[in-house]
């Protein structure tokens, strides 16, 4: 079994107050792999930034919605899909026209009855938080933040919930500083090189490698690094993206509005 290691490379300030990029939440690598897309939950804008955090104003654009938490690309990079947590809604946007082409609340999707009890009124502030796409089977995976943590597989036409699995201590989501019940799930990215998922938790400040087929955490590691001789941790990690061609892992913090770059191999 491969044992992965994180090596900190750099971090960049991506805050752009004049544009509303204050609390980045969600991250995805562009189709060409030379930039990143992100959202900020209090702003109705889709932001494009360089791999070193430079804001690309001409490529960024607005949509009607705010409270966006997660973002991914599907259809070979032709379509963005974002998650609106307050409504547990998936919104599809054509990159060509920058217009919404489909949107569906989770409770409008066939198969929702099987997971409806996980979205009770008591936990309605722990809704959908992260999203990724598996090009191997063409399906979208969305991540429920907590109470309980849940990973849901949805057809890319947003018509069917295919499968779901709980994320908890039983399948390896644990930390040495906080209880399993306190762990939240902030974002997710599919790794096509190993057919597994990387999931981050902002409370645990931890990165999990999760295997959907066996429903088990394969490995986990602290989101920590050393800078100028000082031990540091990534606070409020809310977005994750992966470039498998050069083993680069990108993470955004909504607290500090910073982009962190790690080598992972």
Image (cartoon, rainbow, N blue to C red):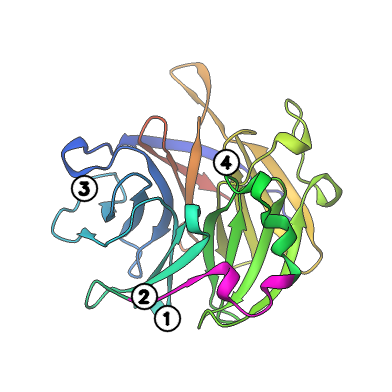
Q: Residues within 10 Å of mark 2 (few under 14, many from 20)?
A: many
Q: Nearer the viewer, mark 4 or mark 1?
A: 1
Residue at image coords 21%, 36%: 17
Q: Earlier in the sequence, mark 2 or mark 3?
A: 3
What residue appears at the point 77 percent right and 39 percent down from the top-left corner? 174
- Give SS at disc 4: strand
Residue 55's disc is: 3
Q: Nearer the viewer, mark 2 or mark 3?
A: 2
Comes first in the chain, label 3 or label 1: 3
Residue underneath mark 1: 75
Q: Earlier in the sequence, mark 4 or mark 3?
A: 4
Label 2: state its secondary structure. strand
- Label 3: how many Cα within 10 Å (few below 14, some 14–19, many 20+): many
**Picture coordinates of residue 123, whole percent (x, y):** 65, 46
Residue at image mark 2? 79
Q: Are dots 2 and 1 in contact, CB under 8 Å? A: yes
Q: Does the magenta-highlighted stretch encompass residue 92?
A: no
| The label number, if any, that marks residue 258 in the structure image | none
Label 4 belongs to which residue? Answer: 6
């Amino acid at each position: 079994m491969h044992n992965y290691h994180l090596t900190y490379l750099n971090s960049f300030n991506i805050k752009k107050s004049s544009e509303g990029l204050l609390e980045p939440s969600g991250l995805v690598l562009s189709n060409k792999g030379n930039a990143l897309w992100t959202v900020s939950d209090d702003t109705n804008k889709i932001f494009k930034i360089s791999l070193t955090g430079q804001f690309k104003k001409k490529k960024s654009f607005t949509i009607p919605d705010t409270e966006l938490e997660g973002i991914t690309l599907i259809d070979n990079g032709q379509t963005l899909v974002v998650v609106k947590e307050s409504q547990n809604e998936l919104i599809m946007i054509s990159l060509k026209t920058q217009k919404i082409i489909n949107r569906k609340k989770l409770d409008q999707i066939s198969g929702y009855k099987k997971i409806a009890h996980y979205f009770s009124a008591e936990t309605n502030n722990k809704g959908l938080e992260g999203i990724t796409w598996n090009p191997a089977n063409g399906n979208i995976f969305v991540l429920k933040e907590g109470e309980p943590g849940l990973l849901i597989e949805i057809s890319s036409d947003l018509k069917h919930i295919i499968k779901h699995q709980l994320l908890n201590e039983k399948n390896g989501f644990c930390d040495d500083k906080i209880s399993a019940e306190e762990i939240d799930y902030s974002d997710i990215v599919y790794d096509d090189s190993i057919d597994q998922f990387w999931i981050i938790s902002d409370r645990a400040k931890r990165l999990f490698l999760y295997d959907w087929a066996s429903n088990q955490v394969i490995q986990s590691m602290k989101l920590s690094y050393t800078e100028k001789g000082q031990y540091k941790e990534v606070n409020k990690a809310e977005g994750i993206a992966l470039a498998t061609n050069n083993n680069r892992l990108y993470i955004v913090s909504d607290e500090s509005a910073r982009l962190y770059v790690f080598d992972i191999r």
